Image (cartoon, helix red, strand yellow):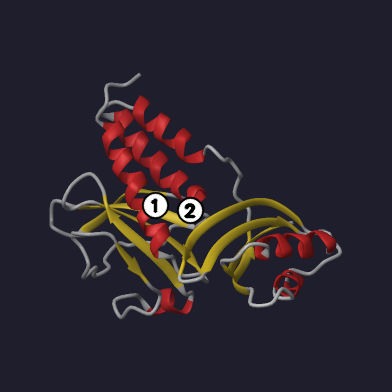
Amino acid sequence: MSHLLRLVVPDRPGVLGAVATALGEAGIDIVSLDVLERGNGVAVDDLVVELPPSRLPDSLITVAQSIPDVVVESLRPFTGALDTHRELDLLDTLARAGDGAQKLLAEKLLAAELPRVFHSGWAVLLDRSPDGSWEVRAASDAAPAFDGLELPWMPLRAPRLLPSDEEWLPERWREMAIEMMAAPYGGDACAVIVGRSGGPAFRRSELLRLVHLLGIAATVKQLPPA
């Protein structure tokens, strides 16, 4: 079974190699590695690993933290498809979409694919309805209902992290530890929200990556369809 392991490691030569060696000796395969952040002497890495049937998920934490100063920030099952070109494929598809029905399909595609790009649980595209409330224009599977919610941060003027302890969140969302990040997209009253339950909290580097991706997506959306 595949798991997503987020590590905070000292940013010095040999540490990540030592983690990889320890995992390998325990029969745990590293399928992919994404470096999320580097700075202040540490690095934050996301590893998708394949756990043999004979091992319990908690053993991943024990093995990884057997290396001095390595901290497991989170561990969760990973069921998404791995694709090193996932962002390019998404942008290519958006560039091929035109107006009207094709534009709506492109927005649905964006919401459906962003969770895979960011190893998250869901994504929604919010817009202002004619009556001034906020409505979901597109959503991925497993996205929670935003209908009727008071969203004090909308309209979104700048990208922001939305941690699970904010007061505006419904009680059930706080109990589920829903972590989110949001960025403007396609107009002053429109925003994309990416979220996951149970953490980990989104990092600033992930938010910047979302902003960058949405900026490119907004540009290619204006191109004539291929």
Residue at x 63%, y 58% (from the top left corner): 47
Q: Seen from this angle, which residue lies furthest right? A: 54
Structural crowding at the residue carrying mark 1, measured as other residues with C-alpha within 10 Å and reported as few (<14), some (14–19) or many (≥20): some
Most foreground residue, 3 or 111: 3
Instruction: Residue type at mark 1: give it.
Output: Arg
Structural crowding at the residue carrying mark 2, measured as other residues with C-alpha within 10 Å and reported as few (<14), some (14–19) or many (≥20): some
Q: Which mark is residue 209?
A: 1
From the viewer's perspective, is the residue at label 1 or at label 2 nearer?
1
Q: Quadrant of the N terminus?
A: bottom right
Q: In the figure, is residue 118 to the left or right of 181?
A: right
Instruction: Residue type at mark 2: give it.
Output: Phe
x then y, percent, for residue 71: 62, 75
Q: In the figure, is residue 71 to the left or right of 197?
A: right
Contact, mark 1 vs mark 2 (Cβ under 8 Å): yes
x then y, percent, for residue 74: 59, 70
Q: Which mark is residue 12?
A: none
Name the residue beneath numbered marker 2. Answer: 118
